[in-house]
């Protein structure tokens, strides 16, 4: 799981991190600096059936949060470019921002 340090975690919720592993999540509402889930994962596809997940489900709630103790995901911290496309304004902004970064500008 890729984590990104931000100045204010209130929009995203915070990720709790210790010794290279994700150990929990703090819901949205907490303010101040911290680590957030950047939305990038490397998973073995078998993990879904291992926890009885098929069809539609929430990766964060039904897999990561529900089974954090068993999964013990490793974390990769980055300070690279990050944009959350979860709200319409940022999705629109991403249409020009991402190509700009992809071209090395």
Image: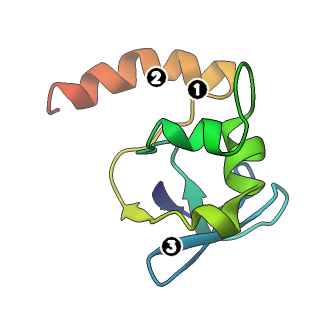
Query: Which residue occupies the extreme bottom position in the image?
Result: 19
x%, y% of residue 83?
49, 37
Which badge, 2 or 3, comes first in the chain's sequence?
3
Q: Which residue is mark 1?
A: 90
Crowding around mark 2 (Cα neighbors within 10 Å: few <14, some 14 to 19, many 20+) is some
Question: What percent of the width, then of the height, locates residue 76?
Answer: 38, 62
Q: Which quadrant is the C terminus positioned in? A: top left
- From the viewer's perspective, is residue 75 above or below residue 103? below
Residue to which mark 2 is pinned: 94
Q: CA distance from mark 2 to mark 3?
A: 29 Å
The image position of residue 81, as x and y in percent, is 36, 45
Task: Specify few, some or many for label 1: CA neighbours under 10 Å numbering under 14, 14-19, or 20 or more.
Answer: few
73 is higher (above) or lower (below) than 49: below
Left or right placement of residue 22 versus residue 14 in this view: left
Q: Which residue is mark 3?
A: 21
Is label 2 in contact with label 1 (beta carbons under 8 Å)?
yes
Q: CA distance from mark 3 to mark 1?
A: 29 Å
CA gap, disc 2 to disc 1?
A: 6 Å
Question: Residue 86: x percent and y percent?
Answer: 65, 29
At a point 45% along the width and 66% down the height, the residue shown is 74
Total marks shown come to 3
The residue nearer to you, when weighing 70 against 41, is 70
Indicate the quadrant where residue 82 lies.
top left
Helix, strand or loop at mark 2: helix
Q: Of 104 and 71, which appears nearest the observer?
A: 71
Please rate how many residues cluster around mark 3, counting C-alpha atoms within 10 Å: few if below 14, some from 14 to 19, many from 20: some
Q: Outermost residue toward the right?
A: 29
């Amino acid at each position: 799981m890729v984590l990104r340090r931000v100045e204010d975690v209130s929009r995203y919720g915070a990720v709790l991190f210790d010794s290279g592993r994700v150990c929990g999540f703090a819901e949205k509402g907490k303010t101040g600096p911290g680590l957030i889930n950047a939305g990038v994962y490397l998973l073995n596809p078998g993990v879904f059936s291992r926890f009885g997940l098929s069809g539609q489900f929430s990766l964060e709630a039904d897999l990561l949060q529900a089974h954090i103790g068993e999964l013990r995901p490793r974390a990769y911290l980055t300070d690279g470019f990050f944009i959350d496309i979860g709200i319409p304004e940022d999705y629109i902004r991403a249409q020009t921002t991402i190509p700009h970064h992809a071209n090395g500008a």
